[in-house]
Amino acid sequence: MTSVDAPVRRVAADVFGLPEAEVTPESSPSTIVTWDSVQHLSLVLALEEEFGVQFDPEDIEQMTTIGAIVDVIEQYKSRA
Amino acid sequence: VTEQVAEPSAEVTAPASKAPREEDPAELRKRADEALEAGDALAAETALRELWALAPGHASAAFVVPRFERLREALPLQGSKVAILRSFTVEPVVPLLRATAFAHRLDLEVRLGEFNAYAQELLDPESKVYAFAPDAVLLAVQARDLVPRLWEDFADLDGDAVTAAVDDASALLRSLAGAFRGAQGTLVLHTLEAPGVPSRGLLDSQAARSQAEAIRQINRTIAELAESERHVVVLDYDALVARRGRDRWFDRRKWLTTRMPIAAGEQVHLAYEWAGCLHALAGKVCKAIAVDLDNTLWGGVVGEDGVDGLQLDGEYPGAAFREVQRALLDLHQRGVLLAVCSKNNPAESLEALERHPGMLLRREHFSVLKINWQDKATNLLEIAAELNIGIDAVGFLDDNPVERELVRRQLPDVTIVDLPRDPLGFAEAIRRSPVFERVSLTDEDRARGRYYAEQGQRRRLEQSAGSVEDFLSSLEMRVEIAPVTPATLPRTAQLTQKTNQFNLTTLRYTEAEIEELRSSAASDVLTLKVVDRFGDNGLVGVAILHFDGEVCEIDSLLMSCRVIGRTIETAFLAAVVGEARKAGARRLSGRFVPTAKNAPAREFYSSHGFAGADVEDGSSVWDLDLDTQTVACPAWIELTIVDAGSRNGAG
């Protein structure tokens, strides 16, 4: 568990309309039915708002699970 | 200044639920879910609205929208359908738009056009857009998509090529607006944004024929369309982008990867802009705003500081309250009625209103004054009654959060302007409130404040005159009934849209529909104007008649609440009877459809000798035998009927 873990899960739970408990580091488009390309963009935008960052396109491609998203954001945080 | 609750209203005890406002989104989320669980719709709505105000954005939108949807049955939400036609990705903006609208009790059903297919969708009368029958169509098109030549390749173009590109774009916009003409609803056109960095760099500013100027020319065409086409409204996207900052607004990476040109945190500002426009179009607006005095309309407390001690000069902090007055005066000029709702001593307050040199607003700007020690909810109800408007058409402005919360609890239909703590933010909060937006103004709107001032004189006369008949005679009313004309068409449609109280069927018509009825041989649209000794009330009534052989059917008959209770409806009906006879009808039939608000019209048919019968859906149908019965114009009304000519086409 890291400092960005909880807010990432909350934002993802909001965007996908799920209870926070159902969002785990392993959650991905194959485990969350509402995680389609449109919702992925909404998730990215919500995370950019939450953390005050703008992701590089390459990094957005890496965001295939909640755990991977946390990793990407931590990189941005450590750079800041 | 405002945190100290200086008015005697501080004595008001807050309801138990009123804790200091939570500033923590997590707390508000919890409160919303608990209230939803407990079935307390108002508390849930308040928490969701506060959450949206505190933390607007994509995550909050995803949280609040489905919860507002669950409150649909329990809250007085107004539905509206909007189609968004676009040249870029707008999907993520939709929840932001719906959340903003929900926070102001507008429930939007949104349909998106295909990517970059806006032209086909508008030009093809069979397209899904028209099948959806939207109340509004937003045309969200960017300069870089509509005129790529002017956006990307401007540096290659000579003067003629620039002119040709401007003309092409203008012609396309004109044809799109023209294609929409027959549809119902309103077309909302975005202006085009100016380029952040012109193709020719500094050179661009040195030439009259600049890239920025070419874009401005297209925007001028858009403004002209709004002026000439009744069903077109402009949303100034360029001004929005400029206000937020062009560099901050544009997200090049998202644009190139997902065709979403707007940075994550800026998208909500487009949603606000859209929502404001849709609010005005949906008529989900307040007709009046009731304002507190101490520390709201002026700085200080008149009962303690005296009239001369009030802060209202051009310097801080008085300047903040001058800005509030300027914002309210701007609302007054667009037809929003002003009222005072204050716990105060009337004498001192009136003195301040009438003679403080810093006041921009004076006694005559206010249609109603409630300056007393009653509770504000009672005063607001009295204000609504005196103005003849529903309580849901009243906005409330008060610096005291306790008063706001009390009114919210007691009168949940009142729109409360959420004010920040700092008075420097008050004027902006008023200006940003979508319920006071209007997209078009009629002469009646502009003059409304004056009408109500005259109404006050009429009421005083009513109290002094003897019998009702004496009173009505003393008004010297002159009523003119005329067929609708192109000049009266906008006001006629507006009356069908807005009139709730004296309205027999509450059928709403667009200008296009009225125009169709006007040119139909089988229908008449009659308008009613009233002049009396206090002034011209303007166009205040509409009747729509259908003719079918020996039957004349009253499709609609409605009158503005300004003239209710003066037997004008009898004069109107007398004119309708005359028109029906002239058309060869032997029977005049009508229908009364009850709504939550049209009780004033309930007795209309029965009191004029119609024979009625109830029908299954709660409404009733009524008949008058024109062979044996008639309706006479009251003796105290001078009735003039302007001849329709004949009902055989667009005369």
Image (cartoon, coloured by chain):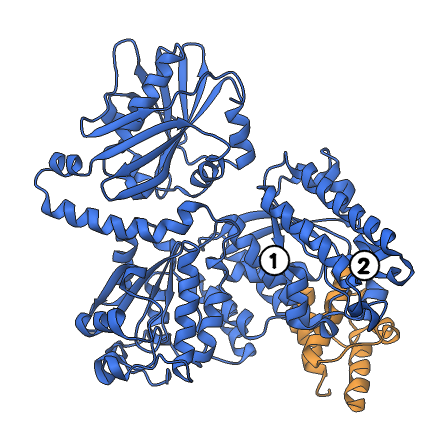
Chain colours: A orange, B blue
Q: Position of residue B417 (x, y in %)?
A: 43, 67
Q: Work out whether B134 lies above or below B372.
A: above
Labels 2 and 1: the sequence-earlier one: 2
Name the disc covering residue B144, or none: 2
Q: Identify the amino acid type marked 1.
A: Trp
Q: Report which quarter residue A44 is drawn in.
A: bottom right
Q: Image check: A58 left or right of B411?
A: right
Q: Secondary structure at mark 2?
A: helix
The answer to whether residue B41 is above or below residue B227 is: below
Residue drawn at (30%, 44%) of the image:
B562
Circle 2: residue type: Arg
Query: Residue at left 46%, top 41%?
Result: B494
Query: Residue B311 at x, y = what percent?
Result: 34, 82
The N terminus of chain B - image quarter? bottom left
Image location (x, y in percent) of residue B294: 30, 76
Chain ID of residue with mark 2: B
Tell me the element at label 1. helix
Q: Residue at 57% across / 65% down in the picture? A: B64
The residue singled out by tag 1 in the image is B274
Q: Residue B615's image quarter?
A: top left
Mark 2 Cα shell of 10 Å, populated few (<14), some (14-19), many (≥20): some
Foreground residue among B304 and B306: B306
- Report the front residue among B280 and B43: B280
